[in-house]
Image: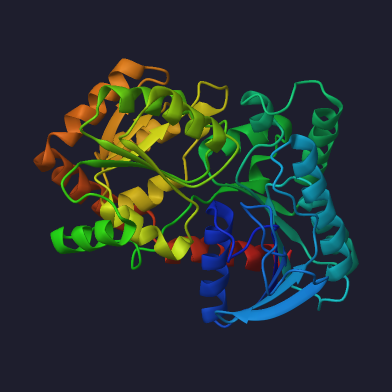
Amino acid sequence: MRLLILSQYYPPEIGAAAVRLSRLARLLAADGHSVTVLTGMPNYPSGKIQPPYRGKLIYQELVDGVDVRRVWLYATPSKRARARILNQISFMGAAALRGMSLPRPDAILVESHPLFVTLAGGWLRRLKRAPVVLNVSDLWPESAVATGALRAGSPIVKIAQRVERWAYADAAHIVGMTQGVIDGILRVHPRPEQVSLITNAVDLDRFQPADAAGRARARRALGLPHDRPIAVHIGNMSLTYDFEMILSAAGHLPEVLFVFVGDGSQAAYVVREIETRQLDNVQMLGVLPHEEMPLVWSAADICLIALADHALAAGTRPAKLYEAFATGTPIIAAIRGEGAAVIEQAQAGIVVAVGDRAGYAAAVRALATAPERRERMSAAGRAFAEKMFSPLVVKQAYQMLFERVART
């Protein structure tokens, strides 16, 4: 098949969407499909376009057998909602124009979030007469309203709600990545025959449990101590998470090293709080390339997840869960609903109530002082990942879906 993937984010950018879509594109290309990715100049999360992409309107490269076509977009380090929306709209327009000259695909996979990319996908659907499969990884604007990033009833939210409903109706099929996302879609688009659940996957070859020697090498490479329990928060530092809970635990557990890897709107807050509270057991590693993530996981004893108490928390499966399972890193999560259920099913961590700071700190202490318990959870998590999160199963699900929408 000839397939087109439309996504604002793609490697060398980091983040869940870039990792997930590049893996899918690479596997589809390896199966003999002609895969083209239409994406933006890399700038996430720094907001700065780097060489060799800087100053270019378009850029083409072959990556892992995938034809990657990049377009200019407005990039800025600003975390303000207005700047981010301008960034998204600029990509929408540039992608719509660049896509006009691409060969007609058999199917188009459109990644939403950002939501406005769906407008470019709808334009290309009509121009190329190719069906759209809409991949929904985040309910937007619902998630932005739930976390307080946008105000309910504001003009941008009203516009986004109309775009969201139009995008659902315009797609030949919709893929939700969690049951919570599926439920949110069906609340405004009650056509279950057009909606499928395809969960995330993880590269089981790259992400594996580390032995003692591998753990020591990883800690040396990252400049981390070899003789302390290490708990890590990896990924986007956004309003989705409750960093007060993690920092509170750090304040009560000086014997544990808390490490943050990533960036986001709450990173500056975390840095200020570390200084204010004088937490010498908290370290910020900043943004690291995804190629270095296996190294980070190898150095870690515990994966930290603490969701903020918002309306969509019950339907959330943080992307870091998959790599934690694959690397056998025990999880401590303040989470409920779907995310809590999968951790408990895997027997790969401890779940505490959202907002329970005392319970969270107690859970970190319990695992930090119990290496044999961590080993049991590690083995259980890895076994669960091998059974449930194979990339080949996910690739096959998308391939069958593309074939079906192309036929009909």
Instruction: Tell me which corner region of the image, top left, top right, bottom left or bottom right, holds residue 125.
Output: bottom right
Choose top left, top right, bottom left or bottom right for residue 66.
Answer: bottom right
The residue located at (55%, 57%) in the rendering is 14
**245 to the left or right of 9:** left
Where residue 285 appears, as percent x and y from the top left, is 42, 49
Q: Is residue 288 visible?
A: yes
Give the side of residue 97 with respect to residue 184, left or right. right
Residue 166 versus residue 44 in the image, above or below: above
Residue at image position (57%, 22%) is 311
User: In which quadrant is the N terminus drawn?
Assistant: bottom right
In the rendered image, residue 156, in percent from the top left (x then y), is placed at: 83, 32
Picture coordinates of residue 8, whole percent (x, y): 70, 57
Q: Using the image, determine if residue 176 lies above or below residue 221.
A: above
Of residue 30 and residue 375, the one placed in the foreground of this image is 375
Q: Position of residue 308 (x, y in %)?
A: 50, 25
Tell me the quarter of the picture where residue 401 sits.
bottom right
